[in-house]
Image (cartoon, rainbow, N blue to C red):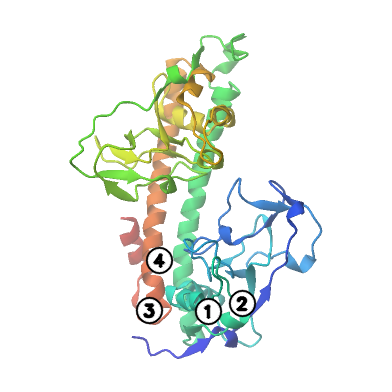
Amino acid sequence: MSDWPTTTLGELIHVKHGYAFKGEHFAETGDKLVLKPGNFPVGGGIKLRPGKDDYYAGIYPPEFELEPGDMLVVMTDLTQAAPILGSPAFVPSEPVMLHNQRLGLVQIKPGAQVDERFLYYSMLSESARAQVRATATGATVRHTAPERLYRVRIGFPDLRVQQSVGEFLGALDGLIDNNRRRVRVLEEMARAIYREWFVNFRYPGYESVQLVDSAVGLIPEGWNVRAASEAVEINPSIKLNRTVEHPFIAMGDVSETSMVCLPSETRSGGSGARFANGDTLLARINPSLQNGKTGFVQCLEDGEVGLGSTEFIVMRGRQIGRAFTYCLARQEAFRHNAIASMVGASGRQRVRNECFDTYFLAVPPQYVAQSFEAAAAPMFAQVDLLHRQATNLGAVRDLLLPRLVTGQIDVTSLNFDRVLEDAVA
């Protein structure tokens, strides 16, 4: 155990309340985002939520516009099942973010000998967050207050040690963030190429090909109009060994903005979606479909069959390739057609498979389709690798963090390059 002295947060910081932004001025788009507890994942940081975030179009006091690098802490839980109370985060450089009343702005007191990154990781530790939860009140949604946060105790070594711990953990988080940025760039590149080739019809050699009339408008000569159900196999039949465990992908394992999806558990039996590497998983239920949940499977062993939620539609390219199928599933027009077909009670509506019979697309000649797959395949593979590396780095960070901020591990005994090598091996 550490022999570090301890101190209370009240000796180090002041927490400033946020502003009660008025709901009538909220908008789905804009350039000023109202931060809310839902933007704070348990592991720290800030996460944007396309389709869920609110932007502000009204007038507000200027002191509640946050600066990049400001540190915030969550003062109110979302629900009892989502205990994010006490989660800290630094404000990123974009977009402009606004400080609402359910968040506290952490300000280090003048003269306090505390490293800001060490403070962040200490507040992120389970030890500190458990103390925050213990201060909370409320029967349904629990909340705390600055004066209660001030009672939380953290380890408090000399400033040099604090800086070393903050630098080590910050470097790990920097690598994780860099991997995630690269994932976003690679996926957007693949989707941009898809739109350029198959929506705008500016593919290699397009200049020498005439456009001709078709049921979907002008398309390149030699291309064919097909229903999505012809071009793509919907819920392909897959044999399954019911006696063994299979990787299981739940709806929560699928991203709203990216292709990445990794199984969170294993299950036996035959209920639910069945899929293989190269298949696309499309949420069939709202609000998951509206929010963008769509995954590309590339996490299985060769020949392995995966299981998933019954609320997935499995898409497998038939006249088009794997990458084309995934990018098609991400297209706004394709998704709107699926959403328009939904039936069922409000809040639990599901896509009808018949909607794929009425959505038509231009299917390119084989040489164009193969060229796109050849261009997209290494991007998709790199997305998978970078995501796995980020996941492994995150696990290492989560393992080391509570030990480093309490002095159970001496930061000078760690070789960063060796830690990194082991994490991404």
Callout 2 secondary element = loop
Could you tell me residue 82's position as x and y percent? 49, 61
Q: Which numbered dot is residue 145?
A: 2
Say few, some or many: other residues with alpha carbon within 10 Å of mark 3 (under 14 / 14 to 19 / 20 or more). Answer: few
Label 2 sits on what residue type? Ala
Above or below, comparing residue 122 to residue 151 in the picture: above
Mark 1 or 3, which is nearer the eye? 1
In this image, 317 relative to 339: left or right?
A: left
Residue drawn 45% across the image and 41% down it: 259
Using the rendered image of the protein, determine whether residue 70 is visible from the camera's viewpoint. Answer: no
* Cα–Cα gap, marks 1 and 3: 34 Å
* Cα–Cα gap, marks 4 and 2: 29 Å
Label 1 sits on what residue type? Thr
Q: Do the residues labelled 1 and 2 touch (CB within 8 Å)?
A: yes
Image quadrant containing the C terminus: bottom left
**Image quadrant assignment for residue 59:** bottom right
Sequence-first tag of 4 and 3: 4
Mark 4 or 2, which is nearer the eye? 2
Q: Report which residue position mark 4 lands on.
A: 397
Mark 1 or 4, which is nearer the eye? 1
Q: Nearer the viewer, residue 11 or 351?
A: 351
In this image, 215 relative to 421: left or right?
A: right
Q: Which numbered dot is residue 412?
A: 3
Above or below, comparing residue 207 to residue 261 in the picture: above
Say few, some or many: other residues with alpha carbon within 10 Å of mark 1 (under 14 / 14 to 19 / 20 or more). Answer: some
Furthest-right residue in this view: 59
Residue drawn 24% across the image and 40% down it: 269
Sequence-first tag of 1 and 3: 1
Q: Are marks 2 and 3 in contact (CB under 8 Å)?
A: no
Label 3 sits on what residue type? Thr
Q: Report which residue position mark 1 lands on.
A: 135
Residue drawn 53% across the image and 77% down it: 119
